Image (cartoon, rainbow, N blue to C red):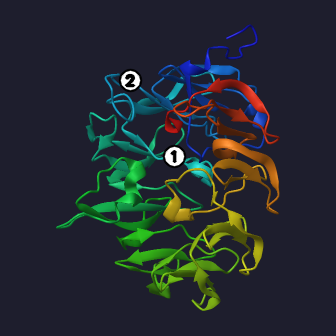
Amino acid sequence: MDETGAVVLPPVCLTAWDETDGQWTQDPKKALWPICVGQWYGYVNHRGQIQIMPRFDLAEPFIDELGLGPVQFGGKRDGGTYGPVGSKWGFINRAGKFVIQPEYTGYQSLGRGGHNGGLLPVAIGGEAMPDGLWRNQKWGFIDSQGNVVIPFRYDGVFPFKDDSAIVGIRVPQAGPSDVGDETASTGDDMGTIAAKWGVIDRQGREVIPMEFDELGYFSDGLACVRKGKKCGFVNPRGQTAIPLTFDDAYGFCGGTAPAKLGGKWGFIDRKGRWVVKPTYEDVGGFEDGLCAVKASGKWGLVDTAGHLVVPPRFEAFGSSASVFDFLEGRRAVFSNGLCAVRVGELWGYIDRSGALRIEATFASARRFVNGLALVNSKPGAPGEYGRTYYIDTRGREVGAYYRDHDDQ
C-alpha cells in the first residue's frame, strides 16, 4: 500500500468478501469491508484503505452496533475447498484485537437483521472436515463479551429477530432429507437427517415446539410453516392461524403474503383469502413493501395490494442466493435505494420506480452495503476473468481492485 494506506497490489493477488447480507450502519464512513490479500483476510474503509491488516482465515462484515468483527483464525492451510481446515471463529475490535477468542466451530451470520440484540449465534464441538467445514456441532448464543446466554444444545439455529430465534434439532429418518437446506448455513450435513424447527425466546424458553419441517420468522404477527408438503401460518403461540393448505408461501407484509397453489403464485390476506389469485410463475418474499413476481419469463415488482409497480421486464433480481431464502423470501432487495437486476446477460441497478440508475455493464453485482457494492466487470475475452471491485451508488469504482473466487 502507499503512504495513505491505499491498496496498490496487483489485482490478481486479491479476493473480496462475497456474501450479500452484511451489516448496516448509520455512518458509512465508519464501516469496514472485508477483503483478502492472497490467502489472508482483513478490512478496508470506505476509501479502500486497509484498516486491519489481512491475517485471518476468513472475515465477515463488522457488527457495527457491537463494534465486533467475526473472523476465522488458526486453521491449517492444506487445501480445504471452503477454507483452512480446523479454523475457528472469534470476534475482533476495530483495532484488530480479539475481544472474544477464536474458539467456536461455527458462526451464523446476523445478516440484514441487525445486531441481534447483542446475542451471537455460535457453535462448539463437532468434527473438522477436510473441505474446511465443520460437522455435527452444537449451537447456542453468546453475548458481546463471550458469555453463554443460551446453552449449546441445538443442531441448527438462526439469529434472533426481535425477541425470538428459530432453532432446530436432528431427527433421524430412513431416506435422504429434502429439508436440509434449512441448516446449510450452520455447516451441518443433513443428508439422511430431517430437521425439525421451533422458536425460542431470549431466555431460551421454547415458545413454539420443534415440530415443523420449515419455519419462517414472524411478520405481521404470523409465521409461515411447513409440515410435509403443505404450508400455512401460525401465531406466536404456535396455533394454526391459516390452515396448511398451500404448496408454498412466504411471510406477510402489510397484511398480504405470497402463496402458491396448483403450480401458480398469488397473494393472500391474513385470513387465507386470495387477494390476487394464483397467476404468477414465481415470486419472492416482500421487502420494504415490494415483492418480486415473474410472468412470461420476466421479473417485475408488485406492492402489498398486488398492484404492479414495475412491469416484468428483467431477467433476474438480486445477485446470489442467500441463506435466508426461505426465512425471509427470495426478494428484490433494495439497499441504499438500489437493487441489482439482470438485463440480458449483464447486471446493473434500478431504483424503486424501476428506472436503471447504474447501467447494466457487470458480469455480476452484489447488494449495496453501507454505500458500496461488489461487482465483477465483463471479461475482455472468452476464458478471461473480469476484475472484481467495489463501486459507490453512482457506479464509480472505489479503492483497489479485488478478485472474487466465486466469479471464476
Question: Which residue ends up furthest to the front in the rendered image?
Answer: 382
Picture quadrant where residue 88 is located: top left
Q: Which residue was labeled with disc 2? A: 74
Relative image position of residue 49 (x, y in whole percent)? 70, 21
Q: Residue at x 34, y 34 (%)?
A: 132
Relative image position of residue 84 (x, y in whole percent)? 37, 28
SS at circle 2: loop
Left/right placement of residue 61 relative to residue 185 reads: right
Residue 110 makes an appearance in the image: yes
Relative image position of residue 99 (x, y in whole percent)? 52, 28
Left/right placement of residue 276 relative to residue 154 reads: right
N-terminal of the pair, mark 1 or mark 2, is: 2
Q: Are marks 1 and 2 in contact (CB under 8 Å)?
A: no
The label shown at residue 109 is 1
50 over 20 or under it: above or below: above
Left/right placement of residue 397 relative to residue 380 reads: right
315 over 124 or under it: above or below: below
Question: Residue type at mark 2?
Answer: Gly
Label 1, label 2: how far apart the Cα atoms are: 19 Å
User: Who is closer to the viewer here, 107 or 238?
Assistant: 107
Is disc 2 surrounded by few (<14), some (14 to 19) or many (20+) residues within 10 Å? some
